[in-house]
Image (cartoon, grey):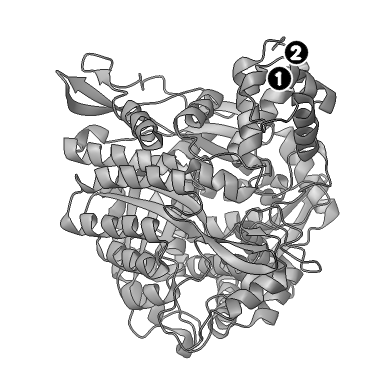
Amino acid sequence: MKNFIMLSTVALLFWACVTENKKRVNNLEDFKYLVDEFADIKIIRYQIPNWDELSLQQKEYIYYLGEAAKCGRDILWDQNFKYNLLIRKTLENILTTYEGDKDTEDYQQFLVYAKRVFFSNGIHHHYAEDKIIPVFSEDYFHELIKHSNLETFPVQEDTAIEDFSNWIADVIFDKNLYKTRRSSDNTKDLLLESATNLYENVTQKEAEDFYAAMDDPNDLTPVSHGLNSKLVKRNGKIFEEIYKLNGLYSDAIEQIIFWLEKAMNVAETEEQKNYTQLLIDYYKSGCLKTWDDYNIAWVLDTEPKVDYVNGFIEDYADPLGRKATWEAVVNFKDLESTKITAIISENAQWFEDNSPIAPKFKKKEVKGVSAKAITATTLGGDCFPNPPIGINLPNANWIRKDYGSKSVTITNLLTAYDKAAEESPQSTSVEFIYSEEELELNKKYGSVGSVLLIDLHECLGHGSGQLMPGVSPNALMDNSASLEETRADLFALYYCADPKMVELGIIPTLDVAKTEYNRYIRNGLMVQLSRIELGKEVNQAHMQGRKLIATWVYEKGKEDNIIEKIVKDGKTYFVVNDHDKLRTLFGELLAEIQRIKSEGDYDAGKKLIDTYASKIDPELHKEVRERYQALNLKPYAGFMNTRIVPVEKKGKIVDYIVEYPTDFVQQHLDYGKEYGFLKVMY
């Protein structure tokens, strides 16, 4: 009966078609990118340009991959926090069945809270990691439950609704309970201080000892131990619960496999079919060797137009930098924009040879570096609704070294960000840029410089350099992600100002690099602080990287006044006076960060993080927050997904069209119904 119900649900999703004479796409003439704003967040829609240029087979392939990308949503929610699914289903029930007055201030605050939880894939802030505390009262929350359908709350059998209401209210409202998703406080046990559901009843030392016993420093092709599992301690025994079919998250993984199997049958090439089968085999077995085999086959296949990412991939959410959250992105190649990224990847060996790092840390032969610009069609898991704008995979260092990597820049998301900014009345550039000359440069080259930095960061930065023999890829532990983002940014910063960029035709003038240097320092020292609550420190990996770099070069360049701090009319500005000397400093720091990674120097890496990446000047922080808030802008942005719909004619699928929903809450309610495959945990 269970299999029949599951397949019936899938069939309903598959045949949710439109007739051929239905309007093919939403009217794009009056397309609004910015569709919602709440708390510190704005919601944007992205378009899928050139959709009609795809073949029917390519569209079908994208559709199936897109369904697979949405089927893992519950996995991420549960990984983020053990009660996230239960809380989400409670919020969904209130949103759909509450019979009280919805025009009150309290209800509007509840709506904002629900949106924030949907955006963060759980009750902890997606960047700051702290628990999101509702503005409305706990008493009002009880009233919301009382006046909603009591039969459809996720209540355990034999539990009174009043007891359920009190218990879940404590989880949501108690500031001291599950207060941080991922702790970065090295003075305490990182696992015991974190609410993440990647570990259960395990101390930091127990986890480190468990995996230290598995790691073999002499293994030149090591699997990523712990990547796809939850580490658990029960009855005194420590063991892994593997994410796989008939293992942890089986019901969701079964659905992912279902759609991947359908996608495999309409793949563009035999190579795609083969590595998709490897991915399916991996989901069925949980075998990390199979995961490596899949990644090797995937990275070597660079010809097809359609591509995807699907799996347990990034370890940013793990306090120990080992376990991965689930994510997915479906895309096709942006042929015009790929011309620039192709030039970068074709010259990968030149960049490696001329890097300012020590010769022993350089790769003698750079293999398989491919880069392209892509158009995203579906975002899923940890890439939704707040996706990356660039990706470089696989993450295994030995695969990068021996087989290469794929790098992408997601151009339609970058376009959407820019278009949404144009729809906003205010600008951070005008507020935080000191001179008219710098402002004009930013208007002329700002977008070009940002894309260049992303291309260099993803295409070459992550794949550059090599580990020394015997150094574990996990040697930097809790600082690994931040130092890796620092390293990739430094690589991009160093090379974006190289005359080779102009020689290759990648940029028209080195003024592009000057503009990007100005922006990076301005953002690293000031603008990004608008995202952080007063009294808090920087703890997100990418933000720590920017803060570390900008603060380090500012301090090291003080004697030569390379970066000048100017206060005018009570406002602080940072102005780059010597871009050439700044590039030299970027090179010096890159050399040290690469040494730290190549040698696994944990202590040196930790010292850099503690000294330059985390702490914030409270007076400057207060000023930045006040200036940013006066602009009435939202520091964070994320997306709604498009909806790809089959078009049926006489019982046959003849096309797939793109729809652009506008209701953020409704999309998440729909996803809860259509892709909510996992049972809640108590």
The dot on residue 516 is none
Q: What secondary structure is marked by label 1?
A: helix
Q: Residue at x 31, y 49 (%)?
A: 337
Where does label 1 land, which residue?
Answer: 108
Are the residues flagged by discs 2 and 1 in contact, CB closer than 8 Å?
A: yes
**Quadrant in the picture for residue 484:** bottom right
Q: Residue at x 40, y 26 (%)?
A: 660
- Is residue 562 at least partly visible in the picture? no
Residue nearest the viewer, comparing 424 with 481? 481
Please state which amino acid type lies under the numbered disc 1. Gln
Rendered residue at 77%/48% (across/down)? 179
The image shows residue 594 at horizontal and vertical percentages of 54, 79
Q: Quadrant of the N terminus?
A: top left
Up the image or down, 654 lies above or below 227; here it is above
* Real-space CA distance between mark 2 and mark 1, rounded to the nearest whole angstrom: 6 Å
461 vs 107, nearest the viewer: 107
